[in-house]
């Protein structure tokens, strides 16, 4: 099974959307393999968003991500990265389809509720930033035989 990283950003946590978001992923059939709520330290925020370090919006992005707790999760399932990206919707909420997380809960690109890895490679990198291998649960869900051929 594939793994992906998902972070409910401070606006999503503060608006009480964690349960709704977790419920959507679970209802889809994805398996929660790790989760924690924490205030991210600057060094991990810099590592998380390193491709944006030289962009003019980075200081504001970093301040926002560190402004409150984030809910960090690891999800498993067949094609997990693509499935989650589809479920969260376009980065710009104005372009996110209704029914997607951003389409349903976000109005502003700077406060778009959620982050998810955009490729298997970024998933592996981001999981390594936020989770140690001992923090992930390895188990079988009771419904796996009806989810997959």
Image (cartoon, rainbow, N blue to C red):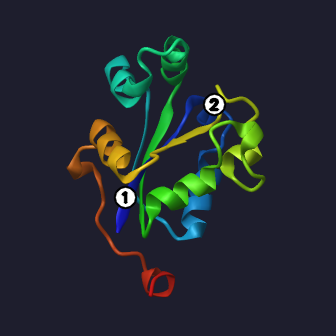
Question: Which residue in the protein does label 1 denote?
Answer: 3
Query: In front here: 109 or 66?
Result: 109
Q: Residue at x 37, y 48 (%)?
A: 123
- Secondary structure, mark 2, is helix
The location of residue 20, given as percent across then percent down, is 65, 52
Query: In front here: 78 or 42?
Result: 78
Question: Which residue in the protein does label 2 denote?
Answer: 11
**88 sits to left or right of 145:** right
The location of residue 118, given as percent across then percent down, is 46, 46
Which of the two discs, 2 and 1, labels the residue nearer the N terminus?
A: 1
Query: Residue 63 bears which disc, if any?
Result: none
- Secondary structure, mark 1, is strand
Looking at the rendered structure, the number of numbered marks drawn on it comes to: 2
Q: Residue at x 59, y 36 (%)?
A: 13
Q: Which residue is drawn at 45% across and 23% down?
A: 52
Q: How far apart are marks 2 and 1 (CA)?
A: 24 Å
The location of residue 23, given as percent across then percent down, is 60, 59
Quadrant in the picture for the C terminus: bottom left
Q: How crowded is mark 2: few (under 14 residues within 10 Å), some or many (20 or more)?
A: many
**5 sits to left or right of 105:** left
């Amino acid at each position: 099974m594939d793994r992906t990283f998902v972070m409910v950003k401070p606006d999503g946590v503060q608006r009480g959307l964690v349960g709704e978001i977790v419920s959507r992923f679970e209802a889809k059939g994805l398996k929660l393999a790790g989760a924690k709520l924490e205030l991210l330290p600057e060094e991990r925020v810099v590592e998380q968003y390193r491709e944006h370090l030289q962009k003019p919006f980075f200081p504001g992005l970093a301040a926002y991500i560190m402004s409150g707790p984030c809910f960090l999760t690891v999800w498993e399932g067949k094609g997990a990265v693509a499935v989650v990206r589809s479920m969260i919707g376009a980065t710009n909420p104005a372009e996110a389809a209704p029914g997607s997380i951003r389409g349903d809960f976000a109005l502003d690109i700077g406060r778009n509720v959620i982050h998810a890895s955009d490729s298997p490679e970024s998933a592996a990198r981001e999981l390594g930033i936020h989770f140690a291998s001992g923090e992930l649960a390895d188990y079988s869900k009771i419904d796996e035989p009806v989810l997959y051929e």
